[in-house]
Image (cartoon, rainbow, N blue to C red):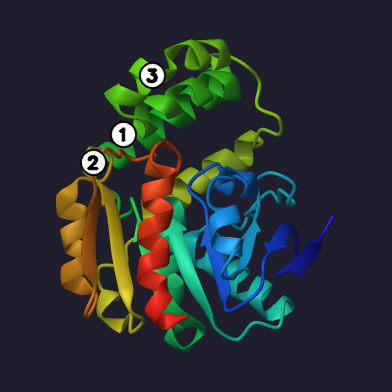
Amino acid sequence: MPTARVNGVELYYEEHGAGFPLLLLMGFGGDCHAWSRQVPAFAARYRTIVYDYRGVGQSEKPPAGYSIAQFAADALSLLDHLGIARAHLLGYSMGGRIAQHVAAHHPERVGSLVLAATSAKPNALNLYSLKAGAYLYEKCGPEAAGAFGPLVSFTHTYFAQHLPELMRALGQPAANPMPLHAYLGHVRAIEEHDTTGVLAQILAPTLVLFGDQEWLNPLAEAERLVRGIPGARLQILPGGGHGFVWEIADAFNDAVLAFLEPVR
């Protein structure tokens, strides 16, 4: 099991493929296996690195040290451990917040940047959904909080097509749930994130990807990123909600690869 000792914490990671490095940064609560629909496509062209954040999956779960700045420092230290001076970054949701921090404060480390279903700071709906999830986790356990996830992630079409499997998964225990302290630490990290003042420091070519049925981070959030990041461009994918990395994975992957191709 490959691990790296990073900033005092053991992080689990995986590498797939060869070529210019591509670091994938998952959303809140997701481990590296949440990228299963992306890794085969990306690894065919890039040295694709996925890992579990501190507090998640097979990584250590320390009692403290949860912030976007700390997650960004962990990402950079993992790249250092792997001997990688510069990489493409793809950040989804919370991972997009981490990617913004890295790209703004360490522009020399970023070849290009893809920000997917994310924002420069949490909006009121983000804050409410985080508190609701934390309440369910603390009062009723991880299964209850997990039942909330599909409501945030998927479209009406997805529910219509996958209702039986969603119902079967309802209340099922997660394979490796986050401990409560880590869950709450990740919640606080998102609540406190705000890169609006440093977006102009991002120098890497940047693609902002959103689904046309996204509601957790509405179109105005994408437009704020595009206005703030020099030269950034927006691409909206039809048929996708917040969870478009899974729901319309092929379209998502194609958009990322098309963007990265000229800057390989």
The spot of residue 89 in percent (x, y) is: 48, 69
CA gap, disc 1 and disc 3 = 28 Å
Q: Mark 1 points at which residue?
A: 128
Q: Name the residue under label 3.
A: 161
* Label 2, residues with CA under 10 Å away: few <14, some 14-19, many ≥20: few
Which is more N-terminal, label 3 or label 2?
A: 2
* Label 1, residues with CA under 10 Å away: few <14, some 14-19, many ≥20: few
In the displayed structure, would residue 136 be above or below residue 25? above
CA gap, disc 2 and disc 3 = 30 Å
Looking at the image, residue 12 sits to the left or right of residue 234; the answer is: right
The spot of residue 68 in percent (x, y) is: 48, 61
Between 127 and 106, the residue placed more toward the observer is 106
Looking at the image, residue 98 sits to the left or right of residue 237; the answer is: right
Between 110 and 21, the residue placed more toward the observer is 21
Between 263 and 72, the residue placed more toward the observer is 263
In the displayed structure, would residue 245 be above or below residue 180? below
Task: Specify the label residue 124 is tagged with.
Answer: 2
Q: Is residue 3 visible?
A: yes
In the displayed structure, would residue 215 be above or below residue 201? above
Kindly state the secondary structure of the residue where label 2 is placed: helix
Which is more N-terminal, label 3 or label 1?
A: 1
Q: Which of the 4 quarters of the picture holds residue 227?
A: bottom left
